[in-house]
Each structure stands twice: as C-alpha cells, then as structure tokens.
Image (cartoon, rainbow, N blue to C red):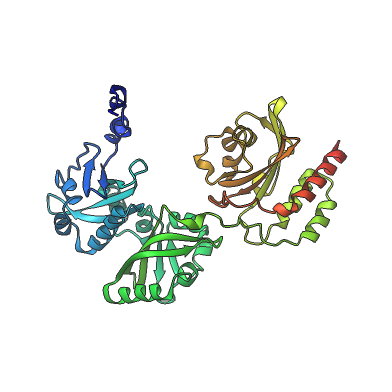
Amino acid sequence: MPETGNKQNTPTTDSCLSGYLDLLPGIVWRIDIVGNEITFLNNHTIPSLSDRARTVLQNPQLAQHMIQPEDRENFHSCYQQIRNRHACACMFRMRLEDQTYGWFKMMAMPDPEHPTSSIGLLMDITPQVSTVLSSEGRPPLSAKIELQKDPALLIRFADRSVYMANSAARKLLQYDKKKMSSLDIHQLFGDNAAQKMFDLYEKLIFSNTWSGELNIADSLGRKHQCTARFQAIARNEQNLLWVTLVHRNNCSACKGVPVRGNEKVPAKAVRTAMGKCKTVKQLLTAMLDALPEGAPTNAMMLSRIFIDKNKVAVTGVGAPFETVPENRTHTYEGSIAENIVRFNLDRHVVMETSKSIKPIDWALFIPRGIQSYYAHPFFTNGILTDVLIFCSSTGGSYDPDADAPLKSLYPDFLKNLARCRKSEK
C-alpha cells in the first residue's frame, strides 16, 4: 500500500534535532554498517582542518597520513569498535593545515533508531589540552589522565599495582582513591582467560600496545564487559601501563547480580536486637548495623505514607541523616511513594540521583551526598503505607533486578515496626 501524504510529511528525528546538532562544537555523523556509508548530520567545520576533517572519517589512507604515528593504532581500534556498533571514545593527535599537531576526540554509540548504524562526534579539543600545557608546562599524569573521560588507569610495571585512576574509573569500579591504590592488575583482570592474558602480555612486550575485550571486576564483585586498550609509557623514571576502558553497551554483568546486603546475615542476632528496640529510629539502626562489611549502604530511611493527607513522614539513620529530625514531613506529590503508586512498582532504584527530576531527591538526598538508593514498598490491604530506603554515597550501588537488601528480615521488621509505633503513641 502506498504511503499517505501525511506519513511522508512526518518529520524525522534527524530533522527535528538538526538545529541542535548544528550547535554542537564538532562534526556529527552516522555510519551505516551494512551499507558502508557515512552521513554527516550537521554543518560544523573544524577551522584547523577545513574539509579534511570529514575526509579522515571516510578515507583510511588520509587518516594514516594525518594522525601522529603513536596514536594511529588507538584511532583505528576505536574506529573499528564504531563499525562493530560498540560505544567507544578515544583521543589522538592529528596534523593541522599549518603542519602542527592538534588534539582531537572521537566518540560514538550505537544509533538507537537505526539498528545497523552508529552515530558519532569528532571534535577539536586542542584549546582544552593547550590550557593544561600552558598553565603547568609539561602536564602531570594526574592532569593527563583526567582529560580522558572514559575510565583510565595507570598500572606500575614493577609490581602491577594501580598507580593512578581517573574519576571515571573510580566511579565504574566503585573504589575510593585510597582503596584503588592498593589494588593490583590480577584483582581487576584476574577473571579473564589465561590465554587472553598471555596474548595481552606478549603484545605489550613486542609492540607496547594491546586492544581487546576484557572483564574487569568492581568492588561489588560485578564483572563489567569492557573494550580495553593498554599502552606502555615511561614517566619520571617509572614504567607504566596506561589502560583505557570503554564499558560495552551490552554488558550483562550489570544485571542480575545480588546487591551487597543479601548475603547471609546473623538473623538470630539481628532479630534479637530488633526485639529490644523501643523507637523506629532504633529499629532502623539495628537494620543498618546488620548489613555485612563492604555493603555500599551507609544510611537508611523509612518513609511513612499518608496519601489522603498528601504527605510523607521520614525518619533516617546513618551519618548523612544525622541532622534530619525524626518524622520530618514532605509532600506526597513528587515523592518516591508517588512514583511507586503511579507506576505500580514493587521497588524503585535510582542509580544516580544527580540525574533525577524528583523533588524529594533534590530536597532530601542530593544535599546529603546520597548518590543512589534502593526503595522497597510495604502495602496494607493494597494501600502503600511505608517505604524502606537503603542509601549509598556512591552512585550505581544497587542492582534494579536484584532483591532488596536484608529482605529475609522484613517480616520481623514489620512486626517490630508496629510494636514501636504503638509504644510511641
């Protein structure tokens, strides 16, 4: 059946976004993997390269000529990942029209609307790099590693320990700076096949670089599937490996892994402690203390729900909530509870509160450094009455597909909650 005139006039996503794409400080393109075609989605020109910037994305021979030799493998490896529809990014130096070199960044992701395509951005970052160079002369490694927006690590040759990690790596792996510096390469990459690690070391010995796919372990024991690039460098009389990681968009390691806190707990001791509690705050403290060592939860909150009165009353324990008064009230509208009721949720997990648009997150959690939380609802006769919230000062601490922490203790928790509320009246 022929298409109607109305359908032909329906604007595409590209046409709707064209005005915004033209505002981006780089060249935006789409590669059709099957058709081996590139389409440029905006009109941006990089003055230092003129039309050659677009040609570099089309002509491998020109790229080979213009990109600095030390960066060619990094560029080609990244470009191959783009052709395989993997999310990736890299930085490299490229010859300018005046025969000097400038710094560029290329990044791409699978196009969600075109299943055989990737969409990418090429931008000139020379001004940012030059700022670092001019202010510090030869930039320290700490400055250079933070220029890399993807997770990046520096590993010592001598003992294979982590010498330095950028903020993106610490966020992915869920380690603070002190703990990160005590790790070695086997703790991070030890889950990979022996043959793969042998190939990695062999390539580093003979060519100083290696690129491929690896699993990397975070502090919660999850194995993240990453595209990794290793490069040997020497700096300040130290031999180091520069490791760049790109989290694969189809990483299965981030799903189905139990949340820390669901391990076996001393249930008998915890139930005894809860039975001695006289207030809701004491009860929450008993639950918080029951979490095993290494659990990401460092605060807990109970929200009592009064939908008909458009309010919730919250009580929190743990360092982030020390200054929050007991039974502090907030409006039900814009709360976690409203989200649960509105979408009929059996749990509500926020991986990064800074991305939230819920008023309660900005009023209660974000100002106190809570970056992620797991909220478990309790219903009475089909009506939401309470929400128990496990809070973490680290982003991405809770798996949305896993059971709530300490779930086996909930029947005892509810029984003691009713008793404590009755005695508080």
Q: Nearer the viewer, residue 132 or 274?
A: 274
Residue drawn at (31%, 74%) of the image: 203
Which quarter shows the C terminus?
Answer: top right
Q: Find residue 345 and report its horizontal and vertical position in percent.
A: 62, 39
Residue drawn at (45%, 64%) of the image: 215
* Residue 11 found in image quarter: top left
Determine whether 285 is above or below 305 in the image. Answer: below
Find the residue positioned furthest to the front.
1
* Residue 80 found in image quarter: bottom left
Q: Nearer the viewer, residue 264 or 292?
A: 264
Residue drawn at (78%, 44%) of the image: 280
Find the residue positioned furthest to the left.
98
Q: Find residue 289 and report its horizontal and vertical position in percent.
A: 72, 56
- Side of 260 where 54 appears, left or right: left
Q: Find residue 355 and report its horizontal and vertical position in percent.
A: 49, 40
Q: Is residue 192 visible?
A: yes
Q: Find residue 34 and report its horizontal and vertical position in percent.
A: 26, 50
Q: Is residue 157 visible?
A: no
- Side of 204 where 170 appears, left or right: right
